Image: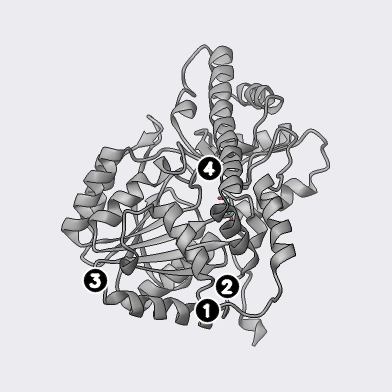
Amino acid sequence: MFEKLFSAPPDEILELMQAFRNDPRPNKIDLGVGVYKDHNGYTPIMKAIKVAEKKLWASETTKSYVGLTGDIEFHQVMIDLILGNTIIPQRIAAAATPGGTGALRQGLELIKIANPRATIWLSDPTWPNHPSIAEHLELKVAKYRYFNKLSQSVSFDEMLIDLSNAKEGDVVLLHGCCHNPTGANLNHSQWVALAELLCEKRLVPLIDIAYQGFGDGLEEDTKGLRHLSENLPEVIIASSCSKNFGIYRERTGIILLISDKKCQKKINQDMLAFLNRNSFSFPPDHGSRLVTIVLQDNTLRKNWEEELRKIRSGMIENRNALARELRSRTGSDHFGFLSEHRGMFSLLGFSEDKVSELRFKHGIYMVSDSRVNIAALSKTTIPILAEAIISVGL
Ligand code: LMR
């Protein structure tokens, strides 16, 4: 049987992470995988999470199973974090999942059951795991234009033109904020125009929000998503706690199904339980319990929000500092877009050859499309990166 297997295509981001670990050069710089790093190049545990772990250790008396869709209190705090009070609870079904990827997977599994003929429309470019999971599930995939490489901004007109070719019931995968890999995001009036098109064409948004709080703020980053949820009959949301709570390895995420029919909630909830049962049975509990403790405790929540605010403003400072450094070295505003973008990533706009040169000559690792992790830069590494960029040429 095993001889029928094939070597699965490697995931570039994860391969890069391993290659970086294996590189013996002491001054190497990792701008690859989307993990936050402090100025020492370390990914710390957030302070509120550390306190929550102590609280959990002291109070938890059993490790027995919870429920197929996870803990109800986790659902409530996450619904509140993502949607505020914009949507009545009777419209929302929820399930805890192993990370945001688990939520995406369950969302796509559900689409396959509900409408196997749906095409999944993905932004061009997008996070490589989006097409990978959809194609693995044998769902049809199409691309919509999203990014103008010359202006380094969203090509919104083209996006609407492409999506107007979608057929009723198709699914549009959107990045809730902090677009990965481009860093270029829709503004509010574009979200409003998009909602109109989705409504008119009867398309279903699947919103991946993996970086809430990394863009302009916890609330600000959900404005587009909330607008869609308030104005469309059906919305699927896949959210991750990996980045904003810094609990990457705990695999904590949630899927929300929003329906305009209150009677649909029970069916949706049952379907999520069925999907979890058939994939992994019960979702991981530890991370979701930590998130719940932090969000339910006023002091911990304030501490967490403050630490997240510092991470966010650190990323904006890194963006501005790199743009400034490159402006002063090139005498041009070619990299001014770095300050406009938000979130962990931007594309530098380099060819694969230049990306290789940066890696092999300078020990600077980035994804081959020239995506850099802004959150991994520091005062020390920004001038080194700028110098290396100049040496490989624009
Ligand atoms: C990334 O895009 O680097 C992160 O989302 C990590 C991953 O799993 O790819």
Relative side of 1 to 92, left or right: right
Residue 169 or 229: which is nearer the viewer? 229
Mark closer to the chain start, 2 or 1 = 1
Report which residue position mark 3 lands on.
Answer: 261
Crowd around label 4: few <14 · some 14–19 · many ≥20 (10 Å): some
Question: The disc labelled 4 sits on which kind of residue?
Answer: Asp
Residue 106 placement (x, y as % from top left): 46, 71
Give the side of residue 37 with respect to residue 206, left or right.
right
User: Mark 2 to mark 3: distance in Å?
Assistant: 27 Å
Q: Quadrant of residue 306?
A: top right
Numbered badge on residue 369: 4
Three-letter amino acid code of the residue under disc 1 = Leu
Q: Is residue 333 above or below residue 375?
A: above
- Counting from the top left corner in percent of width and height, residue 251 is at 61, 62
In percent of width and height, residue 202 lies at 20, 62
What amino acid type should be assigned to the residue bearing mark 2? Pro
Residue where numbered disc 2 is placed: 283
In percent of the image, x 68 and y 24: which residue is there? 379
Of marks 4 and 3, the one in the foreground? 3
Q: Give amino acid for label 3.
A: Lys
